[in-house]
Amino acid sequence: MKRTGMPLSIRTKRLKLRKPRLSDAPVIFKSYACDPRVTKYVTFKPHKSLKETKAFVRRSISEYKLSRYTYAVESRQTGELMGNFAVRIDRFKAEIGYVLAAKYWGKGYATEAAGAVIAQLFKNRGIFRVSAVCDTANRASARVLTKAGMRFEGKLKRWIIHPNRSKHPCDCFCYSITR
Ligand SMILES: CC(C)(COP(=O)(O)OP(=O)(O)OC[C@H]1O[C@@H](n2cnc3c(N)ncnc32)[C@H](O)[C@@H]1OP(=O)(O)O)[C@@H](O)C(=O)NCCC(=O)NCCS
């Protein structure tokens, strides 16, 4: 598969986005993958065992540097693992998504990471569009996307299943930034 040119790690003022390691799995499991507050508006159910989290990390590692980067988000100050930030690239466009452990919410971290990832993506002259979708009820995520400079594009009806909310597909907001 073609490489997409994202760096192995990205630094911001407070964060380092880096390649995940299998040794991250116990922290990921305990700090956010098992937390129903974190998984409310995402496509996976809370992990019930470390085995599930290990499988997720293995997948993230094997996809890395191909079309999809799931960066581990780390505090530069303490080295703590705080969440993850996914970037999926499809030729001339990219999609982003993110989760943070609840104890890090409300401090601007997701916005900081999103801003840096968008800037990095647009360094590639072949990328023309970065987009993200979020559940229409996910106010925090919608706010992050706006603060990161994205524009509201519209509502995607019945777009995706968020299994912790409903077994039926939910409506999502779509945001993008283009050049
Ligand atoms: C979405 C998420 C990553 C945001 O991370 P974060 O670091 O707290 O985000 P930021 O601090 O950069 O910004 C959050 C903004 O949302 C606002 N916000 C938070 N909860 C809100 C709510 N219920 N209603 C309205 N605004 C809300 C905050 O006030 C802040 O805006 P402000 O700076 O104008 O005050 C985090 O809440 C999370 O991990 N949620 C669970 C996983 C998830 O839903 N991921 C997104 C899937 S699309």
Image (cartoon, helix red, strand yellow):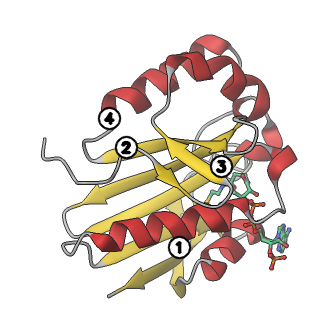
Say which residue appears at 71% left-offset and 47% top-offset: 100
- Quarter of the image where ligand 1 sits: bottom right
The local secondary structure at tag 4 comes to: helix
Circle number at residue 8:
2
Say which residue appears at 27% left-offset and 47% top-offset: 67
Q: Earlier in the sequence, mark 1 or mark 4?
A: 4
The local secondary structure at tag 1 comes to: strand
Q: Which residue is mark 4?
A: 63
Q: Earlier in the sequence, mark 1 or mark 2?
A: 2
Q: Earlier in the sequence, mark 1 or mark 3?
A: 3
Q: CA distance from mark 4 to mark 3?
A: 18 Å
Tell me the amino acid under the disc marked 3. Answer: Val
Circle number at residue 99:
3
The local secondary structure at tag 3 comes to: strand
Say which residue appears at 53% left-offset and 73% top-offset: 157
- 15 or 41, which is in the foreground? 15
- 88 or 39, which is in the foreground? 88
Tell me the amino acid under the disc marked 2. Answer: Leu
Is the residue marked 4 within 8 Å of ligand 1, measured from its CB? Answer: no
Tell me the amino acid under the disc marked 4. Answer: Glu
Q: Which residue is mark 1?
A: 157
Q: CA distance from mark 1 to mark 3?
A: 23 Å
- Tell which tag, 3 or 2, sits nearer the viewer: 2
The picture places residue 14, in percent across and down from the top left corner, at 68, 56
Give the image quarter of residue 137: bottom right
Q: CA distance from mark 4 to mark 2?
A: 12 Å
Question: Dividing the image into 4 quarters, which one contains the N terminus?
Answer: top left
